[in-house]
Image (spheres, rainbow, N blue to C red):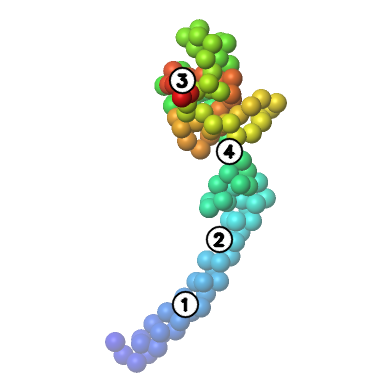
Amino acid sequence: MNRRGFFTTLAKITGVAVVAPTALNAVFSSSAQAQKKRGAAPAAGGAAAGGMPLVDPNDSVAKAVKYVEDYKKAPEAKGNNCTTCGFYAKKESRNGKEAGTCTIFAGKLVYGDAWCASWNKKA
């Protein structure tokens, strides 16, 4: 490499080292602003900003365990529902109904009046 090539390469590397942090900061801050504008939860914040979503009855896991939002619509429930299940823990009220977490559906809420085939009597 000759002297001119060395200084050209050095200038390019220096330029990248100066411009890259500014460009990356602009990209990541605009992404965070977009999430804030949409009301989405930040990556590290989890449930604090947007709340946990409810289980979708059409979700593959929900279908696999025969999840229904109203235990009265499932004859095999035999009067049991999520509030009497050992996997359920009351958390909040959604749409005027009790909702809580379930270990079967990590990161999502289920209605207290819901039922699934994994129901297990509370101890």
Hey, what amino acid is under mark 2? Phe
Q: Which label was assigned to residue 52?
A: 4
Answer whether residue 3 is visible to the viewer in this image: yes
Residue at the top extreme? Answer: 75
Q: CA distance from mark 2 to mark 4?
A: 24 Å
Tags 2 and 4 touching, CB below 8 Å: no
Residue behind mark 2: 28
Is residue 112 shown left or right of residue 103? right
Foreground mark, 2 or 4? Answer: 4
Q: Residues within 10 Å of mark 4 (few under 14, many from 20)?
A: some
Q: CA distance from mark 3 to mark 2?
A: 47 Å
Is residue 96 shown left or right of residue 91? right
Tell me which numbered mark, 1 or 4, is placed earlier along the sequence: 1
Residue 88 place in picture, x, y as percent: 51, 28
Residue at the right extreme? Answer: 96
Q: Residues within 10 Å of mark 1 (few under 14, many from 20)?
A: few
Hey, what amino acid is under mark 1? Ala
Residue at the front extreme? Answer: 123
Q: Residue at x 59, y 20 (%)?
A: 113
Tell me which numbered mark, 3 or 1, is placed earlier along the sequence: 1
Q: Which label was assigned to residue 17?
A: 1
Foreground mark, 1 or 4? Answer: 4
